[in-house]
Structure formats: structure tokens, C-alpha cells
Image (spheres, grey):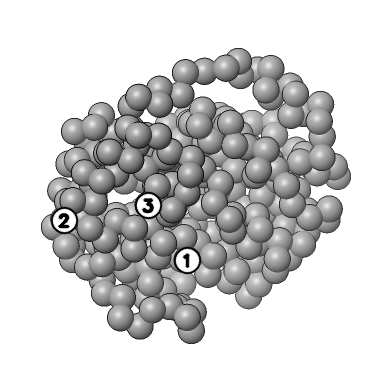
């Protein structure tokens, strides 16, 4: 493992930027990352994203509430893993546009030596990657421009091995991303390949949209598909399959606001409003 924080390596950043010449962000077409940014109140979105997001909100008016609940779940689970579970290595796939607090900020607030690798193949996220490559002097952060559909490329990436020691436990995060992988792409098989590349004692944190409590989530998924964005909500049983062979931490698979809620979690939140399942599980 490299002792230098990649966030402090200008040569590394230049080499990555040169390897990825300017690309067309297709700002005239809606994009899931920018729509999510819009739900969270961010500014990294364009008229096409806002129009598609408003159509989605017409189908599922609680999309903003669900997005914020998902972010809060990320913070709680990361604090638990860095604190009580003692994890010092994190791999976050499907990173999305940086929104503070980012995962590395949460992990390093608990364990300054935590090392974090972000992975996304989205040129929009790549343009913001510098914001992700900041952290404590004791820890490290890195960014991979890779596709979830190519797990082996993720697991063999030099930046990954320069930052993480895969002989030691890693916390793998796939938050609000698997519902953009249709059944035809074998999402369970893709995730299994990633987990197979991590040692025993590693963890999986996953969230996923569901229409179990509000069929508006299916209408929202349909609105994404109509905009050219693959989207598929899944039932509790289908989401639970992602954790096959792993040991779920208490309280198991829950609508995310019910997973070890903080004292400031709004007490009146309902399952229908949130409509995201989430859990953390340990690899044996």
C-alpha cells in the first residue's frame, strides 16, 4: 500500500485527467446522478435533469425525502463500521456527485486513518472527483473511473491496490445504485463477484428502491425509463437476495430510516415516504 495520500499527488491527478479527455456531458439529456443532486438540493444539475426530476416527483412526491433518508443511512452505517466494527478501508461504488458529508468525511471523522476508494464511470462524477480526493493526512482517498458492470476491472485497478490492502477487511458500499442495474444485467452476479474479491470480515452496505409500501415508486422508475435511464424497483425478497451468504447486522433489512436511527431522525417518517430498503452485512 502506498503511504502517500493520492489526494496530495498532483502528478496522479494530471495523469488521470490526461487519460480522460473532455467528454460530452449531454446536458440536454436527464441523468440519474444530476437528478439525485436536484432532490438533495444541489446545484450540479441542468434544465433537462430538473424537468425529468419534476416528472419523477409527480409520480413519487417523496423522492426528496427518500433521497435525504438514504444519505442519512450512509452516514449512520459508515460511523458504525469505522467505529464499532473497526473498519479502516472503504470501497464506495456508484459514488455520484459529491455531497457533503461524503463517505470519506464521515469515516475519517471517526478514524482519521481510514482509506477510501470511490468508483464510478460517470463523466459527471469524474469532473467532481477532486472534491472526493481530499481527506485527512493520516488517511487516503482515491477515485476509479470504472463501471459496476466490470467487477474484475474494479478489483484489479492499480489505484485500488495502491490505496487498500485486500488481505484486510473492506466495507463495500453500493448505495442507491443497484436499482439502475436491470435483471438482464445480472445485478446479483455482479455484486457477488465484488464480494468474492474481498476477504472474510468485510462488510456490504446496500440500499435499494422499493414499491412495497408505495406503488408511486414503480411509477417513478417508469418515469426514469421513459427518460432513457434504466431503473427497476425491487421487492424486499429481491433486495434480500443481495445479502445471500452474508450475516446481516441487527436490525436486518429495513426501510432505511429504521436502521439504528439517530435521535434526530424525524419520528413521523413513514415507510411509504422513504421506500428504500437498506442493510449492512458481514462476510464470513
Q: Secondary structure at mark 1?
A: helix
- Callout count: 3
Q: Which mark is residue 39?
A: 3
Q: Which residue is mark 2?
A: 216
Q: Nearer the viewer, mark 3 or mark 1?
A: 3
Q: Who comes first in sequence, dot 2 or dot 1?
A: 1
Q: Nearer the viewer, residue 213 or 194?
A: 213
Q: CA distance from mark 2 to mark 1?
A: 22 Å
Seen at 48% across and 40% down, the residue is 44
Query: Is 191 positioned to the left or the right of 91 in the image?
Result: left
Q: Which mark is residue 72?
A: 1
Query: Is 230 positioned to the left or the right of 81 in the image?
Result: left
Seen at 18% across and 66% down, the residue is 213
Q: Nearer the viewer, mark 2 or mark 3?
A: 3
Q: CA distance from mark 2 to mark 3?
A: 16 Å
Residue 109 in the image: above or below residue 160: below
Q: Quadrant of residue 182?
A: top left
**How far across and down, in percent of the image, does residue 107 sit?**
65, 61
Q: Residues within 10 Å of mark 3 (few under 14, many from 20)?
A: many
**How far across and down, in percent of the image, does residue 171 sit?**
58, 56
Amino acid at each position: 500500500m502506498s503511504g502517500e495520500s493520492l489526494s496530495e499527488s498532483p502528478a496522479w491527478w494530471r495523469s488521470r485527467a490526461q487519460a480522460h479527455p473532455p467528454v460530452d456531458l449531454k446536458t440536454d439529456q436527464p441523468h440519474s446522478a444530476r437528478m439525485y443532486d436536484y432532490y438533495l438540493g444541489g446545484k450540479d444539475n441542468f434544465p433537462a435533469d430538473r424537468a425529468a426530476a419534476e416528472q419523477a416527483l409527480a409520480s413519487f412526491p417523496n423522492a426528496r425525502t427518500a433521497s435525504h433518508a438514504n444519505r442519512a443511512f450512509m452516514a449512520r452505517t459508515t460511523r458504525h463500521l469505522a467505529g464499532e466494527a473497526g473498519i479502516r478501508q472503504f470501497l464506495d461504488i456508484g459514488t455520484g456527485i459529491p455531497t457533503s458529508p461524503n463517505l470519506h468525511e464521515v469515516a475519517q471523522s471517526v478514524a482519521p486513518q481510514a482509506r477510501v476508494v470511490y468508483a464510478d464511470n460517470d463523466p459527471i462524477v469524474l469532473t467532481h472527483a477532486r472534491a472526493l480526493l481530499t481527506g485527512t493526512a493520516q488517511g487516503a482517498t482515491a477515485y476509479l473511473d470504472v463501471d459496476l458492470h466490470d467487477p474484475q476491472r474494479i478489483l484489479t485497478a492499480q489505484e485500488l491496490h495502491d490505496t487498500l490492502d485486500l488481505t484486510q477487511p473492506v466495507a463495500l458500499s453500493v448505495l442507491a445504485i443497484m436499482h439502475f442495474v436491470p435483471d438482464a444485467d445480472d445485478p446479483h452476479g455482479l455484486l457477488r463477484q465484488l464480494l468474492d474479491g474481498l476477504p472474510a470480515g468485510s462488510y456490504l452496505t446496500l440500499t435499494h428502491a422499493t414499491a412495497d409500501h408505495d406503488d408511486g415508486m414503480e411509477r417513478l422508475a417508469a418515469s426514469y425509463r421513459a427518460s432513457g435511464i434504466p431503473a427497476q424497483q425491487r421487492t424486499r425478497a429481491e433486495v434480500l437476495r443481495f445479502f445471500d451468504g452474508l450475516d446481516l447486522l441487527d436490525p436486518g433489512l429495513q426501510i432505511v430510516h429504521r436502521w439504528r436511527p439517530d435521535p434526530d431522525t424525524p419520528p413521523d417518517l413513514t415507510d411509504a415516504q422513504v421506500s428504500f430498503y437498506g442493510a449492512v452485512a458481514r462476510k464470513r
